[in-house]
Image: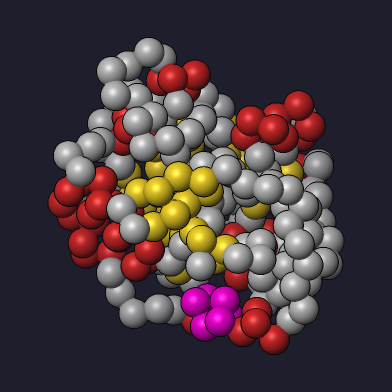
Amino acid sequence: MHFLFILIITLFAINQCETTSTQSTKEQERVISYPEVEPSQAYSECKIGYQIWMAENLNEPHFKNGDPIKQAKTAEEWKKAGNTRKPAWCYYNNDPKNKKKLGKLYNWYALNDPRGLAPKGWHLPNNSDWSIFFNTIQNLNRDAMALQHPEFIGDYPGSDVLKFHAYGSGYRKEGGAFSNINEYACYWCLDTANAYSANALYLKKDQFDLLWGSYYKSGGFSVRCIKN
């Protein structure tokens, strides 16, 4: 398995990720000009420090204004969406049975769309939000195991004590192949690393450190939102 451009850093080093908001964050601010519809479902929550996060992966088939997001089932559909910078989502292995537990995988273009991917009452995490998240976990003297569900990492002492309920949801490569279910949980950040990739949080099975890196925008990762 390979992650292109991945930069792995520890909790201590995550402070370096605080940067000024990129153009993607400005796009997020523009979504208030669009009408808002109710989320397709209610989401469970967990409180980490003063942040309230979704305790499950985003599972929305439409934008905040109600416009549908394309479901890309075939590798060709997924690759085309990335090449044309169009929003897309899928289930891991295109299996609807993964919906309840793993939610949807989205390409980064779905996050950057001005119609708004985050449901009403929520927002997408940027560099600053993730930095606070990392620092809070460090201040609580916790590690990555405190975020991971026992079904993912086994009956480890202290697993999922923060009720984040991370499963090994895997990811979808830019070419359309699925990879690393039950090995990695990968979560998008709204901010970019460069013209081709966006920042992301990685949780690796049986690894204590939270990993911060990046991946191609046309890849498919899970999404967690924060309460406004």
Residue 69 in the magenta stretch? The answer is no
Camera-side residue: 128 or 175? 128
Q: How is the image coloured?
A: secondary structure
**Total number of numbered labels?**
0
Residue occupying image coordinates x 30% and y 74% = 19
Camera-side residue: 5 or 66? 66
**x, y (%) of residue 189?**
47, 60
Residue occupying image coordinates x 72% and y 52% = 60
Lateral position of residue 120 relative to residue 211, left or right: right
Can residue 52 be seen in the rendering of this structure?
Answer: yes
Quarter of the figure with residue 91 = top right
Q: Main secondary structure of the magenta part?
A: helix
Residue occupying image coordinates x 56% and y 27% = 181
**x, y (%) of residue 50?**
34, 58
Quarter of the figure with residue 66 = bottom right
Q: Is residue 162 above or below residue 194?
A: above
Camera-side residue: 122 or 75? 122
Camera-side residue: 47 or 141? 47
Q: Residue furthest top?
A: 155
**x, y (%) of residue 36?**
75, 73
**x, y (%) of residue 71?**
81, 50
Q: Is residue 104 above or below residue 124?
A: above
Residue occupying image coordinates x 44% and y 79% = 22
Quarter of the figure with residue 82 = bottom right
Can residue 214 be seen in the rendering of this structure?
Answer: no
Give the magenta-colored segment's residue range: 24-29
Lateral position of residue 226 relative to residue 40, left or right: left
Residue 25 in the magenta stretch? The answer is yes
